[in-house]
Amino acid sequence: MSLYRLLVAAMLLLIGSLTAANLWLYLQGSQQFLNHQLASHAQDTATSLGLSLSPVLAQGDWVLAGSMVDSIFDRGDYREIQLTSLDGTEKILRRRQEIDTGTPTWFQALLPLEAATESSEVNAQWRLVAELSIQASTERAHQYLWRISLRALWSAGLLALVAGLTGSWILRRLLKPLHLAEKQAAGLRRHRYLKQAHLPRFRELRSLVQTMNLMVDNSEAMFHEQCRQVERLRAQSLVDEQTGLGNLSRGRQRLAQLLSDEELGGGMLVRLHLVGLDRVELKGGVDGEQALLREIAAILTETTVRLPYSRAYRIGFADFLLLFPGIMQDTLAQLEAEMRQHLLSALQQAGGERVLLVSVPYQLGDVGERLEERLEAVMSKALLHEESSLYLCEQEGEPGWVEPSEQARHLDKVLNQPPRLLWQASEGAGGEYLYHEVLVRFGEGDNVAGPGAVMAQVARQQCHQRFDLLILDTLLVQLPRLPKRSVLTCNLTAESVLDPLFIKPLCHRLATHWNRVGLEIPERAFLMDPDRTRAVIETLANKGARLWLDHTTPSGMVLLAQPGLTGIKLDPAYTRALLEEPGQNDLIEMMVRAAHGRGLKVVAQQVEQAELAARLWSLGIDAVQGYGVSPPEPLGADAKRGPDDNGVQSPL
């Protein structure tokens, strides 16, 4: 029971006790007063009637005396009037039966009225001739007592209600800072940080609130300092200072990761060269060159963010590397024309000459150094051309082109049949499973492919919602056949996350499955629209969803402050570099500490070597996922080490 409820209950008990006691004392006093009034009234009547009867009885006229007694008795105020001669020969007795006046019997029993019999002597010429006794009736007195009791009860109840409401309001106002402090404490336990803007007036509560705010400030400061250290470590070795893009080292890490990523398959590798960039500084100075580089970086970022997992890197003074996983030459040919036009316009306005774009396709298992050599060879050919804007592919002739309508028909055929679902466990250092991620395969027989190429087509046709709901519907059909203890996660595309029309069908499908099906939200969604991504996370978390931030890089660490996340999945390009660049340890450790400081789990994905898994576990990562520890299996196979039968996650 909360302190507020306890105090309200105590206050109501006190008010009720005082009201009942005061009401009872009032009724007791009224009872005693009425008893006294009945006795006094009977005595006054006996005295006055005795004086009136004296001359009548002196003459011995008992008939007239009876008439006088009847006139008094008929008023109805008396239960009994008796006049008896001294010698007992004459007697006048008038007695009334009690009548029902509407007063409840239980009330009469609870507060009985006692009408005492009062007497008076009748004298005739200084001689005692008779004795008169009168007993008042209690009927009207009970009726009066009942009416004033009802009025007193209603008045006391109304006053008690007003006192209770007023007291509750005062208690709520007084305890509001304490209630907020309780929320702060609960938030700290769940790594959600709240502050009270207004300090209470009372010394004790003010001190408590100040202490809680200080704890929140310290926690926030520690988290932001960790984020700054992560960004500083990343910038020192992996970021180009002038553009904010990844540098050559970061680009090679990403390329190496893509060349072994069995989920995305092949793609296109593009190199951009800006001819005449050195003249920009001569025309506009260092500031002009810096402004152009920032504009170039913005154009490249805007282009690559359209496609899942695409990235841009600056690898030299005038050279940039672009990675487009999952797409082929025809799709790139449709994309690069618009990008090249924007780049050429920006470059020539700043004083540069021309833009050269060259590309080579890559496949799973290719060697990065050889791909760079092939790119260099195509770039050498491009430099021989005199066109102001040029795009060349390693393959001779015009790039292949597939009509958009044909692409749409092919994609529609793929999405009209349920995909094949696999799952892959995320495994902790002790061998326990944190969850199973659902993986997707499209096609049949020898044409089975991962989601990379299909997602690229989905991006071109803008049917992300259909793509995501197809996978979810296929999973939900198979979910009843899976062990109840299994906890699954399913990837969402960034475009679906940012689509306001997607949340309603998503919540409708998963309304009864939040405890078993988690969702992975790509960091790319946050980079595209931070506010909308935060709102989606909050909405889904309030529904009970388990949310993971997928492909997390240092750029997305700021999202860890957003309540609602269960954990993060690190971008594989950072974790895979551990075996080749031991200096990456500090960056990974800082990201892990920042996440753990917010109460979030950390998973490393696409771990292909057992040695790398061991290194990651030693850095504090909660679980790893990849072919090196647990290859994908058909959905439902080997879940014996998952969460318990009640769907509760493991202690990880």
Image (cartoon, rainbow, N blue to C red):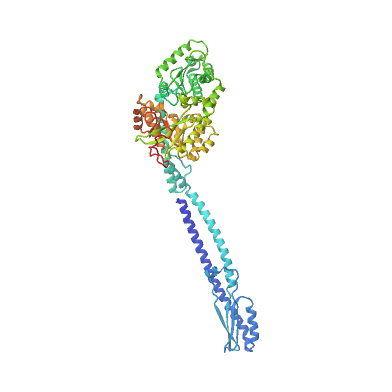
x and y, in percent, of residue 76 in the image: 62, 75
Asked whether 467 or 550 is in front, the reply is 467
Query: In percent of the image, x 63 and y 79: which residue is there?
Result: 72
Q: Can residue 497 be seen at all in this image of the molecule?
A: no
Q: How many numbered marks have been drawn onto this rendered protein structure?
A: 0
Say above or below: 174 vs 339.
below
x and y, in percent, of residue 508 in the image: 53, 38
x and y, in percent, of residue 229 in the image: 40, 30
Say above or below: 405 vs 69.
above
Say above or below: 486 vs 11.
above
* Quadrant that contains the C terminus: top left
Asked whether 90 or 648 is in front, the reply is 648
Which quadrant of the view contains residue 422?
Answer: top left
Q: Residue furthest front?
A: 445
Asked whether 239 or 613 is in front, the reply is 613
x and y, in percent, of residue 446 in the image: 45, 24
Q: Can residue 259 be seen at all in this image of the molecule?
A: yes
Asked whether 646 or 434 is in front, the reply is 646
Say above or below: 641 vs 3.
above
